[in-house]
Amino acid sequence: MKKILLSALLLCLALIAGCGSDNTNSNQATAYWTWMSGDNSTLQAGSYGTKGIPSPTNKPGARYGAVSWTDNSGNMWLFGGEGYDGIGNLSYLNDLWRWDGANWTWISGPSTGNTAANYGTKGVAVATNIPGGRKEAVSWVDNTGNFWLFGGQGIVDTSGNGGWLNDLWRWDGANWTWVSGDNILSQAGVYGTKGTVAAGNKPGGRSGAVSWKDQSGNLWLFGGLGYDTNGTWSYLNDLWKWDGTNWTWMSGSNLTGQYGSYGTKGVSASSNTPGSRRYAVSLVDRNGSFWLFGGDGQAKSVSGYLNDLWKWDGTNWIWVAGDDQPTISATYGTKGIAAPTNKIGGRMQANAWIDNSGNFLFFGGNGTAGNGVTGSSLNDLWRWDGTYWTWVAGDSSSAQGGIYGTKGVTSATNTPGARYGASSWIDKSGDIWMFGGYGYASTTFPGYLNDLWRYK
């Protein structure tokens, strides 16, 4: 199978995804990276061991576009992505892994890639159910600790056909349940009436969307690359809510290819809407507001890499920071010093977290660095304090290799290589973790990664 990079986004997660909404971290004055697990080279196959048994020799294969969760015990979970399976084949993956802080455990799914889904009966948990291999899905954890998985780009049937998915799955800790959506590819959205819940509503198939969970436990979905109400395939800016039973279209357009309506910076207005995009990152602040940053898509009148920061207050979008034009180069300033002239560059498939002081942290992605190079991997770490940007760590130029040091040993010189599409978590101690993605290990050639890093 040919490698799929920027064609038709820890999250997070995000990769954030799958990475996004529960990522909060203690704001330490001095923090460093530690290489904790995996390899310091690219294109590594997985070492699965025995299902359900942790081992220091276990490791997921190199991959990007996986999704991640943290459970109520603080364990970190990883599902799927595009990468290398147990026999070294590049494929869509549907393996489920758990990291307990010391070892990886293969929990569910096959050790070989490009495996079709087994949907079973909608709403019925069965041990044989499993989502098909996929990348760039989104995920949530509900208030009872169940993991939820939606969409992505991947495999649905035994013939190996690939495309864009809109299936919604729940993992209860033992079994998968197909909850909503379709078991066929590339379906158009059914929007209904904006703000009105209906059993027939459903988002269209998509990848590279972002997600949040609100304080009532509802799951939210925004944008991505996929299908609108007419079955047209392109970038989306629709906002959806899942209440545990039904979908509701809440905001944005039911058509693809929408430019942003920015309004006045800092001012809430019903006419404000982020433009259509894929590969943004999402966060939820301590007040329960949703935040959206960057991605690849449509600004005010032109498309490209975005650096706009938006807040959803439950009713309206607010443009908070960044630019209404795309592909803006970063202005780094002095490392560690906040300044009004500092600015993060436009990027997609970054990772994001919120620290315990409410600051936002953003790492890497694919975008525009300080040297003006566009469309290359980044390894810069930024902090947004609500007013100013600060360049915290990493490099101001793109395509930089990592400095791994010794596995398990913290050092001020350690730095992950530039990458995009990594997965990330926050553990119970408030430490940041990041796994894999596509980018640079300790060499000058990019590829799929399976290195696991901690920042504390």
Image: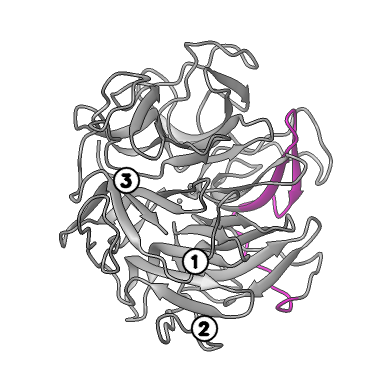
Residue with the mark numbered 2: 338
Kind of residue indicated by mark 2:
Ala
Q: Image point 23% across, 28% down: which residue?
A: 86
> Where the C terminus falls, by quadrant?
bottom left
Q: Is residue 257 above or below residue 90?
A: below
How far is mark 3 from mark 2, CA to CA? 37 Å
Check residue 255 for magenta coloring.
yes
Nearer to the camera, 157 or 73: 73
Q: Nearer the viewer, mark 3 or mark 2?
A: 2
Residue with the mark numbered 3: 4
Corner quadrant of residue 117: top left
Q: Is residue 385 visible in this depiction of the protein?
A: yes
Left/right of residue 429 with respect to residue 385 in the rendered view: left
Corner quadrant of residue 38: top left
How far is mark 3 from mark 1, CA to CA? 37 Å
- State whether the magenta stretch is mostly helix, strand or loop: loop
> Where the N terminus falls, by quadrant?
top left
Which badge, 1 or 2, is on the more N-terminal residue?
Answer: 1
Q: Image point 22% across, 56% down: which residue?
A: 441
Q: Secondary structure at mark 2?
A: loop
Image disc number at residue 244: none
Check residue 262 for magenta coloring.
yes
Nearer to the camera, 414 or 447: 414
Kind of residue indicated by mark 3:
Ile
Where are the magenta residues, as a range? 237-266
Residue with the mark numbered 1: 28
